[in-house]
Image: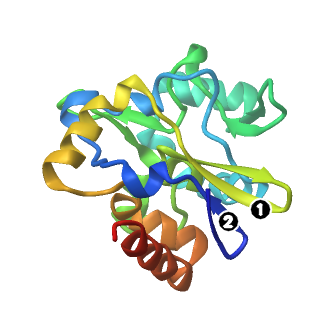
Amino acid sequence: MIQIEDTLISEDIFETCFVCDLAKCKGMCCVEGDAGAPLTHEECEAIKEVLPEIWGDLSPKARELIEKQGIAYIDDDGELVTSIIKGRECVFTYFDAEGICRCAIDHAFREGRISVQKPISCHLYPIRLYRYNGFTALNYDRWSVCHSAVRSGKKDGIKLYQFLKEPLIRKFGEKWYQEVCEMAELLTR
């Protein structure tokens, strides 16, 4: 683990090549898994506020579930997570013409219809954040669904921390990200 400020970063994040290949994986990280996407309470409240703006983008099944259960629930680990439809896809997903799973929150944000971004846990994936002895640990969540992303990253020579520059800066700031880049340079010497 590499320490930068109050974070502990797995060396995998510096070493692993990664570029999402949605044409191959079809966005399965938003469909498969054992629970919804982790949310902070602040994110949950912000999403509730913009829900009317994205309501029409959600599937009928998602709207029905949200009306019954809400946008989030507490999972088996005691974490607040997005609601999921029949143990599968997040309620905020939709499928585009190519059958790729997309995020309605992200879509509306990028169109400028809402000012709320998708949950940071989604934006950072496949990096997962954990609290550990007063630190935030960043770990690479290896998953067979992402094999094509690893191949794409190798082909393009892009490391995981580079691919996730935008969400890493969103979460930890420019200064922190610059330190990550400096550390990556030191590690390659």
Q: Within 10 angstroms of label 1, few (less than 14), some, or many (20 or more) residues? A: some
x 53%, y 71%: residue: 170
Position of the N terminus, as image quadrant, is bottom right
x, y percentage for residue 49?
Answer: 66, 58
Badge count: 2
Residue that mark 2 sits on = 7
Residue 8, numbered label: none
Q: Quadrant of residue 4?
A: bottom right
**Residue type, label 2:** Thr
160 and 63: which is toward the camera: 160
x 60%, y 16%: residue: 87
- Determine the CA span between mark 2 and mark 1: 5 Å
x 74%, y 28%: residue: 69
Q: Quadrant of residue 75?
A: top right
Work out whether mark 2 precedes mark 1 in sequence or the reverse, and give the earlier one.
2
Would residue 156 be found to the left or right of residue 96 on screen?
left
Would residue 50 be found to the left or right of residue 160 on screen?
right
**Residue type, label 1:** Phe
x, y percentage for residue 98?
Answer: 17, 30
75 and 44: which is toward the camera: 75
Would residue 3 be found to the left or right of residue 159 on screen?
right
Q: Residue furthest bottom?
A: 175
Q: Within 10 angstroms of label 2, few (less than 14), some, or many (20 or more) residues? A: many
Q: Residue furthest front?
A: 189
Q: Secondary structure at mark 1?
A: strand
x, y percentage for residue 118?
Answer: 52, 54
Residue that mark 1 sits on = 135
Quick check: can you spot residue 114? no
Figure check: 68 above or below 15: above
- Asked if marks 2 and 1 touch (Cβ < 8 Å), the reply is yes
x 31%, y 47%: residue: 18
